Image (cartoon, rainbow, N blue to C red):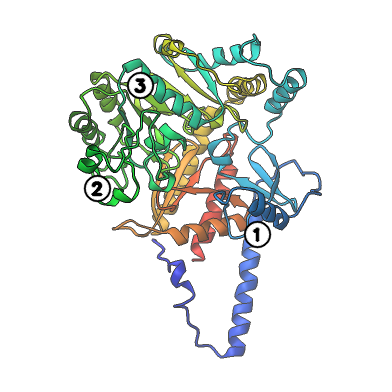
């Protein structure tokens, strides 16, 4: 039976009661007690966990929030009406300043893969920090070489040369520069709804207005075109006259192969034709490269339509370009069936970028490519002060060992399959859920107020998210409209954890 719901914005305005006042108070009081009892029963069903954090003696949430407002950037936002003060973490659980335990189904934005404070990873980082925290890659140290070898062995083909960075943004910036240098072309093709970072080139490749500032995007070749030049007078539109410049990013955004909202549904090859059209009618006929995620993370856990990547990779190759796989979120066993997201599509890229799960929470990223392509950086001096430092690479190597030792890829597949099945059953129960998608432990649940028109349920998403937090479950949200739950927990997530998450979502939606 499909459950209909009253939108949050109407929930209280349209609710009426015609009982006498005294009886009404008694009825509502009883309902409230039953609600609390039912909620407490559900909270008690959180899977047991053998760890209690030490008492917290630091500043209160209000004090921290006050300091954030005074000393940190106003661009920093936070989840929930009443933000959480998280002070401790172990494996798939987080603890607040009161000692309350929460099931972490967000994993620090798909970053914590082995589990919070995994003892093997912590030990590797602490031991290396005690011995040598930082020197420079100008000296030899085994940590960076050992990790580069282990990482290269996880990749197919001739992807053997590693450049270490500190983040996914840095990795994608470097990958795009390498593609431009290697091909001698400037044009990059990205996807609409993509997110690849927030620096110059990566902001150009990103294709959501939420994440793009009105600044020059692309690379150092962007130029100001002055208002008094003939070129300006010929090119500029009336809207841009007030801005005094035009963007020349060299990035073209193709139709997003979104099976749920896309025009062609799940027909990947039809979407791929748009890339061919962009090359023919928007470039010289040759391009530097194509960059995409296998599953768009920030964009709302959107898995590219089947058949899309093989067709696009073929088109890009014919245009002389390189194919860049952004594995910042989908990599490191998260999709379960494969170690890398692109492997689910049967393609081998020329360049792979990665971050987040690579270090289980430490600042670490990487670009991996072939020896031939890597040579382009010898034309000048390329250097990254902190990229490949001993502490981070020791932690990264420990992450790879834990994934193998604890069979986390297999666990992501088994638990992820179970979780997706349960979420799909929930979709069949509530018309609030428009779509359930993703692979392994990278899943998305999109909420809509109308199944036919797929109207984003923005307020309802915030409400459900807040109520799930009260029940002890933390999920993320994303998508252009902010109406998609991003479920990307640590890969040590269990079936019992998955059941508790779905039960909390079910309980919350049933009460709407």
Judging depth in this view, the residue of 221 and 250 nearest the camera is: 221
Left or right relative to 64: residue 348: left
Looking at the image, which residue is at 64% across and 67% down?
36
Q: Would you say 300 lies left or right of 79 here?
A: left
Q: Residue 205 placed where, x, y %?
A: 37, 35
Q: Earlier in the sequence, mark 2 or mark 1?
A: 1
Single out the residue that lies furthest toward the front.
Answer: 228
Judging by the rendered image, the residue that carries numbered circle 1 is 41
How far apart in space, not on screen, are marks 3 and 1 (Cα)? Answer: 58 Å
Between disc 3 and disc 2, whose residue precedes? 3
> How far across and how far down the image is residue 255, in percent?
27, 39
For residue 402, above or below residue 467: above
Q: Name the residue under label 3.
A: 180
Q: How far apart are marks 2 and 1 (CA)?
A: 62 Å
Question: Residue 237's mark?
Answer: 2
Mark 3, Cα crowd under 10 Å, few <14 / some 14-19 / many 20+, is many
Measuring 30% from the left and 27% from the top, which residue is drawn there? 187
> Residue, x 71% and y 21% (percent of image)?
133
- The quadrant holding residue 281 is top left
Q: Which residue is drawn at 75% across and 50% down?
A: 99
Q: Which mark is residue 157?
A: none
Instruction: Of the two numbered discs 3 and 1 on the same chain, state the one appearing first in sequence.
Output: 1
Where disc 3 sits, the SS reads helix
Residue 343 visible, this angle? no
């Amino acid at each position: 039976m499909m459950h209909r719901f009253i939108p949050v914005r109407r929930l209280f305005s349209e609710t009426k009661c015609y009982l006498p006042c005294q009886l009404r108070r008694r009825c509502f009081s009883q309902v409230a007690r039953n609600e609390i009892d039912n909620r407490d029963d559900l909270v008690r069903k959180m899977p047991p966990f053998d760890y209690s954090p030490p008492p917290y003696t630091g500043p209160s949430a209000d004090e921290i929030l006050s300091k954030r407002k005074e000393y940190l950037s106003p661009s920093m936002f936070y989840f929930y009406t009443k933000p959480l003060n998280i002070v401790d973490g172990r494996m798939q659980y987080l603890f607040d300043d009161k000692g309350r335990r929460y099931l972490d189904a967000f994993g620090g934005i798909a970053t914590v893969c082995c589990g919070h404070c995994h003892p093997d990873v912590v030990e590797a980082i602490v031991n290396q920090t005690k011995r040598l925290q930082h020197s420079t890659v100008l000296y030899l140290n085994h940590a960076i070489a050992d990790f580069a070898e282990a990482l290269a062995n996880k990749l197919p083909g001739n992807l053997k040369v590693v450049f270490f960075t500190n983040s996914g943004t840095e990795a994608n910036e470097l990958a795009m520069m390498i593609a431009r240098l290697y091909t001698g072309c400037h044009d990059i093709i990205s996807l609409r709804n993509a997110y690849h970072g927030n620096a110059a080139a990566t902001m150009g490749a990103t294709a959501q207005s939420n994440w793009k500032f009105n600044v020059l995007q692309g690379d150092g070749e962007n130029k100001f075109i002055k208002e008094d030049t003939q070129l300006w007078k010929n090119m500029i539109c009336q809207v841009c006259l007030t801005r005094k410049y035009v963007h020349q990013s060299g990035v073209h955004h193709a139709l997003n192969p979104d099976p749920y909202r896309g025009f062609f549904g799940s027909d990947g090859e039809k979407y791929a034709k748009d890339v061919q059209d962009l090359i023919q009618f928007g470039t010289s006929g040759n391009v530097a490269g194509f960059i995409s995620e296998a599953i768009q993370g920030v964009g709302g856990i959107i898995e590219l339509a089947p058949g899309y990547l093989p067709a696009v990779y073929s088109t890009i190759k014919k245009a002389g370009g390189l194919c860049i796989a952004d594995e910042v979120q989908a990599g490191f066993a998260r999709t379960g069936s494969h170690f890398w997201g692109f492997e689910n599509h049967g393609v081998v890229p020329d360049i792979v970028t990665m971050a987040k799960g690579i270090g289980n929470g430490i600042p670490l990223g990487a670009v991996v490519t072939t020896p031939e392509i890597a040579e382009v950086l010898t034309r000048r001096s390329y250097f990254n002060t902190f990229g490949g430092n001993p502490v981070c690479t020791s932690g990264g190597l420990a992450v790879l060992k834990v994934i193998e030792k604890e069979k986390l890829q297999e666990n992501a597949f088994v638990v992820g399959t179970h979780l997706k099945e349960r979420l799909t059953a929930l979709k069949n129960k509530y018309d609030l859920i428009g779509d359930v998608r993703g692979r392994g432990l990278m899943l998305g649940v999109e909420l809509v107020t109308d199944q036919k028109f797929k109207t984003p349920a923005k307020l309802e998403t915030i409400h459900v998210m807040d109520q799930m937090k009260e029940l002890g479950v933390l999920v993320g949200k994303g998508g252009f409209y902010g109406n998609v739950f991003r479920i990307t927990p640590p890969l040590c997530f269990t079936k019992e954890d998955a059941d508790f998450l779905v039960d909390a979502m079910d309980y919350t939606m049933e009460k709407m």
